[in-house]
Image: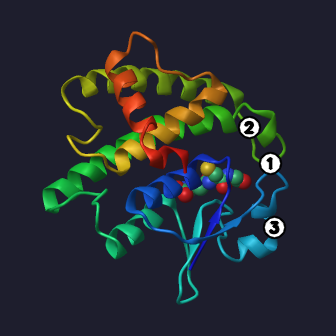
Amino acid sequence: MKLYDSAAAPNPRRVRIFLAEKGVEVEVVQVDIGTGENRKPPFLAKNPMGGLPVLELDDGRFLAETVAICRYFEETHPDPPLMGTDAADRAWVEMWNRRMEHEIALNCMQAFRQTHDFFKGRIPQVPEYGAVCKEAALKRLAWLDTELADREFVAGERFTIADITAMVGIDFGRVSKIAIDPAQKNLQRWHEAVSSRPSAKA
Ligand SMILES: N[C@@H](CCC(=O)N[C@@H](CS)C(=O)NCC(=O)O)C(=O)O
Protein backbone atom coordinates (compact mmCIF):
# COMPACT_ATOMS: atom_id res chain seq x y z
CA MET A 1 0.00 0.00 0.00
CA LYS A 2 1.28 3.48 -0.90
CA LEU A 3 -0.05 6.94 -0.21
CA TYR A 4 0.60 9.48 -2.97
CA ASP A 5 0.98 12.71 -1.06
CA SER A 6 1.87 16.34 -1.60
CA ALA A 7 3.38 18.01 1.45
CA ALA A 8 1.96 21.54 1.11
CA ALA A 9 -1.52 20.72 -0.21
CA PRO A 10 -4.58 20.66 2.05
CA ASN A 11 -6.41 17.47 0.99
CA PRO A 12 -3.35 15.22 1.46
CA ARG A 13 -2.88 16.84 4.88
CA ARG A 14 -6.40 15.72 5.84
CA VAL A 15 -5.38 12.10 5.22
CA ARG A 16 -2.04 12.48 7.02
CA ILE A 17 -3.82 13.85 10.12
CA PHE A 18 -6.42 11.09 9.94
CA LEU A 19 -3.66 8.46 9.82
CA ALA A 20 -1.74 10.12 12.67
CA GLU A 21 -4.87 10.06 14.85
CA LYS A 22 -5.23 6.35 14.12
CA GLY A 23 -1.52 5.66 14.62
CA VAL A 24 -1.28 4.11 11.16
CA GLU A 25 1.92 4.34 9.12
CA VAL A 26 1.90 3.90 5.35
CA GLU A 27 4.59 4.17 2.71
CA VAL A 28 4.39 7.70 1.32
CA VAL A 29 5.32 8.85 -2.20
CA GLN A 30 5.62 12.61 -2.77
CA VAL A 31 4.09 13.96 -5.97
CA ASP A 32 5.24 17.43 -7.08
CA ILE A 33 2.19 19.59 -7.77
CA GLY A 34 4.56 22.53 -8.42
CA THR A 35 5.98 20.96 -11.59
CA GLY A 36 2.57 19.57 -12.54
CA GLU A 37 3.68 15.96 -12.02
CA ASN A 38 0.11 15.16 -10.98
CA ARG A 39 -1.18 16.36 -14.36
CA LYS A 40 1.16 14.14 -16.44
CA PRO A 41 0.35 10.68 -17.86
CA PRO A 42 2.08 8.48 -15.25
CA PHE A 43 0.06 10.01 -12.42
CA LEU A 44 -3.11 10.42 -14.52
CA ALA A 45 -3.01 6.66 -15.04
CA LYS A 46 -3.45 6.36 -11.28
CA ASN A 47 -6.06 9.12 -10.93
CA PRO A 48 -7.54 10.53 -14.15
CA MET A 49 -8.77 13.51 -12.10
CA GLY A 50 -5.14 14.43 -11.34
CA GLY A 51 -5.87 15.26 -7.69
CA LEU A 52 -4.01 14.22 -4.57
CA PRO A 53 -4.13 12.28 -2.31
CA VAL A 54 -4.33 8.82 -3.88
CA LEU A 55 -3.98 5.51 -2.05
CA GLU A 56 -2.59 2.53 -3.94
CA LEU A 57 -4.28 -0.52 -2.48
CA ASP A 58 -2.56 -3.89 -2.16
CA ASP A 59 -4.86 -5.30 -4.87
CA GLY A 60 -3.44 -2.74 -7.33
CA ARG A 61 -6.39 -0.34 -7.36
CA PHE A 62 -5.88 3.39 -6.92
CA LEU A 63 -8.29 4.95 -4.47
CA ALA A 64 -8.73 8.71 -4.85
CA GLU A 65 -10.88 11.23 -2.96
CA THR A 66 -9.85 12.22 0.55
CA VAL A 67 -12.99 11.04 2.31
CA ALA A 68 -12.97 7.69 0.48
CA ILE A 69 -9.36 7.12 1.61
CA CYS A 70 -10.30 8.05 5.19
CA ARG A 71 -13.27 5.68 4.99
CA TYR A 72 -10.92 2.86 4.00
CA PHE A 73 -8.72 3.44 7.06
CA GLU A 74 -11.75 3.86 9.32
CA GLU A 75 -12.91 0.37 8.29
CA THR A 76 -9.49 -1.25 8.53
CA HIS A 77 -8.46 0.55 11.75
CA PRO A 78 -11.69 1.33 13.66
CA ASP A 79 -9.96 2.68 16.80
CA PRO A 80 -10.19 5.47 17.60
CA PRO A 81 -13.39 6.06 15.65
CA LEU A 82 -13.19 9.27 13.61
CA MET A 83 -16.30 8.79 11.46
CA GLY A 84 -18.96 7.93 14.05
CA THR A 85 -19.77 5.00 16.30
CA ASP A 86 -23.27 3.82 15.33
CA ALA A 87 -25.77 4.43 12.53
CA ALA A 88 -27.03 7.78 13.81
CA ASP A 89 -23.59 8.97 14.90
CA ARG A 90 -21.98 7.99 11.58
CA ALA A 91 -24.65 9.94 9.73
CA TRP A 92 -24.23 12.86 12.14
CA VAL A 93 -20.46 12.98 11.61
CA GLU A 94 -20.99 12.71 7.86
CA MET A 95 -23.39 15.66 7.95
CA TRP A 96 -20.82 17.78 9.77
CA ASN A 97 -17.95 16.65 7.63
CA ARG A 98 -19.86 17.50 4.46
CA ARG A 99 -20.72 20.91 5.88
CA MET A 100 -17.10 21.57 6.81
CA GLU A 101 -15.98 20.42 3.36
CA HIS A 102 -18.60 22.19 1.23
CA GLU A 103 -19.12 25.33 3.26
CA ILE A 104 -15.61 26.00 4.60
CA ALA A 105 -12.76 23.94 3.14
CA LEU A 106 -13.85 24.11 -0.51
CA ASN A 107 -14.52 27.85 -0.26
CA CYS A 108 -11.03 28.37 1.20
CA MET A 109 -9.49 26.22 -1.54
CA GLN A 110 -11.44 27.95 -4.35
CA ALA A 111 -10.51 31.38 -3.00
CA PHE A 112 -6.89 30.32 -3.66
CA ARG A 113 -7.38 28.39 -6.90
CA GLN A 114 -9.43 31.09 -8.59
CA THR A 115 -7.12 34.00 -7.75
CA HIS A 116 -3.54 32.83 -7.14
CA ASP A 117 -0.75 32.96 -9.73
CA PHE A 118 0.10 29.33 -8.95
CA PHE A 119 -3.02 28.19 -10.82
CA LYS A 120 -2.67 30.70 -13.69
CA GLY A 121 -2.61 28.68 -16.90
CA ARG A 122 -3.33 25.46 -15.00
CA ILE A 123 -7.08 25.96 -14.62
CA PRO A 124 -9.53 28.50 -16.04
CA GLN A 125 -9.59 31.14 -13.30
CA VAL A 126 -12.50 33.42 -12.44
CA PRO A 127 -11.09 35.79 -9.79
CA GLU A 128 -14.56 37.23 -9.05
CA TYR A 129 -15.70 33.73 -8.14
CA GLY A 130 -12.67 33.43 -5.86
CA ALA A 131 -13.78 36.61 -4.08
CA VAL A 132 -17.29 35.18 -3.66
CA CYS A 133 -15.81 32.00 -2.16
CA LYS A 134 -13.67 34.03 0.25
CA GLU A 135 -16.73 35.98 1.40
CA ALA A 136 -18.69 32.74 1.83
CA ALA A 137 -15.87 31.15 3.85
CA LEU A 138 -15.72 34.16 6.18
CA LYS A 139 -19.50 34.01 6.71
CA ARG A 140 -19.27 30.31 7.47
CA LEU A 141 -16.52 30.91 10.04
CA ALA A 142 -18.87 33.29 11.87
CA TRP A 143 -21.57 30.61 11.77
CA LEU A 144 -19.19 27.90 13.01
CA ASP A 145 -18.22 30.14 15.91
CA THR A 146 -21.85 30.17 17.08
CA GLU A 147 -22.14 26.39 16.59
CA LEU A 148 -19.11 25.78 18.79
CA ALA A 149 -20.58 27.75 21.70
CA ASP A 150 -22.04 24.64 23.30
CA ARG A 151 -19.80 21.75 22.32
CA GLU A 152 -16.13 20.89 22.24
CA PHE A 153 -15.77 19.66 18.68
CA VAL A 154 -17.52 20.24 15.36
CA ALA A 155 -19.69 17.11 15.50
CA GLY A 156 -20.08 16.86 19.28
CA GLU A 157 -17.91 15.94 22.24
CA ARG A 158 -15.53 13.73 20.26
CA PHE A 159 -12.78 14.68 17.76
CA THR A 160 -13.80 13.48 14.29
CA ILE A 161 -13.00 13.81 10.61
CA ALA A 162 -15.18 16.95 10.61
CA ASP A 163 -12.61 18.68 12.85
CA ILE A 164 -9.82 17.63 10.50
CA THR A 165 -11.65 18.99 7.46
CA ALA A 166 -12.48 22.28 9.17
CA MET A 167 -8.98 22.82 10.59
CA VAL A 168 -7.20 22.02 7.32
CA GLY A 169 -9.62 24.24 5.38
CA ILE A 170 -9.17 27.16 7.77
CA ASP A 171 -5.38 26.78 7.91
CA PHE A 172 -5.23 26.77 4.11
CA GLY A 173 -7.46 29.85 4.05
CA ARG A 174 -4.57 31.88 5.47
CA VAL A 175 -2.94 32.15 2.04
CA SER A 176 -6.12 33.95 0.90
CA LYS A 177 -6.36 36.06 4.07
CA ILE A 178 -9.28 34.06 5.40
CA ALA A 179 -8.74 34.00 9.15
CA ILE A 180 -10.58 33.51 12.41
CA ASP A 181 -11.65 36.86 13.84
CA PRO A 182 -10.24 37.39 17.37
CA ALA A 183 -13.83 38.07 18.48
CA GLN A 184 -14.80 34.51 17.46
CA LYS A 185 -13.85 33.08 20.83
CA ASN A 186 -15.46 29.65 20.42
CA LEU A 187 -13.81 29.09 17.08
CA GLN A 188 -10.48 30.27 18.47
CA ARG A 189 -10.73 27.95 21.47
CA TRP A 190 -11.56 25.02 19.17
CA HIS A 191 -8.81 25.89 16.69
CA GLU A 192 -6.20 26.08 19.44
CA ALA A 193 -7.35 22.73 20.80
CA VAL A 194 -7.29 20.87 17.48
CA SER A 195 -4.02 22.54 16.40
CA SER A 196 -2.28 21.44 19.59
CA ARG A 197 -3.00 17.75 18.94
CA PRO A 198 0.19 15.98 17.77
CA SER A 199 -1.63 14.89 14.60
CA ALA A 200 -1.92 18.52 13.43
CA LYS A 201 1.79 18.44 12.57
CA ALA A 202 1.34 15.54 10.17
N1 LIG B 1 -11.97 15.86 -4.44
C1 LIG B 1 -10.57 15.57 -4.27
C2 LIG B 1 -9.77 16.83 -4.56
C3 LIG B 1 -8.30 16.54 -4.76
C4 LIG B 1 -7.51 17.81 -5.08
O1 LIG B 1 -7.99 18.70 -5.79
N2 LIG B 1 -6.30 17.87 -4.55
C5 LIG B 1 -5.46 19.03 -4.75
C6 LIG B 1 -4.52 19.19 -3.56
S1 LIG B 1 -5.38 19.74 -2.15
C7 LIG B 1 -4.62 18.90 -5.99
O2 LIG B 1 -4.25 17.82 -6.36
N3 LIG B 1 -4.29 20.04 -6.60
C8 LIG B 1 -3.40 20.15 -7.70
C9 LIG B 1 -4.13 20.17 -9.02
O3 LIG B 1 -5.38 20.16 -9.03
O4 LIG B 1 -3.43 20.16 -10.02
C10 LIG B 1 -10.32 15.03 -2.86
O5 LIG B 1 -11.18 15.23 -1.99
O6 LIG B 1 -9.31 14.37 -2.59
Indicate the position of residue 156 as horizontal and vertical percent values: 21, 40
- Give the side of residue 58 with respect to residue 95, left or right: right
Task: Give the crowd class for mark 1: few <14, some 14-19, many >=20 residues within 10 Å.
Answer: few
The residue under label 3 is: 40
| Secondary structure at numbered mark 2 | loop
In the picture of the structure, the residue carrying the numbered disc 1 is 122
Local secondary structure at mark 1:
loop
Residue at 35%, 24% (x, y): give it. 189
Left or right of 61 on screen, residue 154: left
Marks 2/1: CA–CA distance: 9 Å
Question: What residue sits right under mark 2 in the picture?
Answer: 125
Marks 2 and 3, how far apart in space? 20 Å
Q: Residue at x 44, y 36 (%)?
A: 196
> Residue 104 location, x and y as percent?
46, 35
Give the image quarter of residue 113.
top right
Nearest to N terminus: mark 3 or mark 1 = 3
Q: Please state if 51 lies on the left or on the right of 199 as rendered.
A: right
CB of residue at label 1: within 8 Å of ligand 1? yes
Inspect the image, locate mark 2, and give the three-letter code of the amino acid beneath it.
Gln
Distance, label 3 to label 1, CA atoms, is: 12 Å
From the image, which quarter does the N terminus lie in? bottom right
Count the labels in the image.
Answer: 3
Extreme residue toward the bottom, this view:
59
Of the pair 157 and 54, the residue shown nearer to us:
157
Q: Earlier in the sequence, mark 2 or mark 3?
A: 3
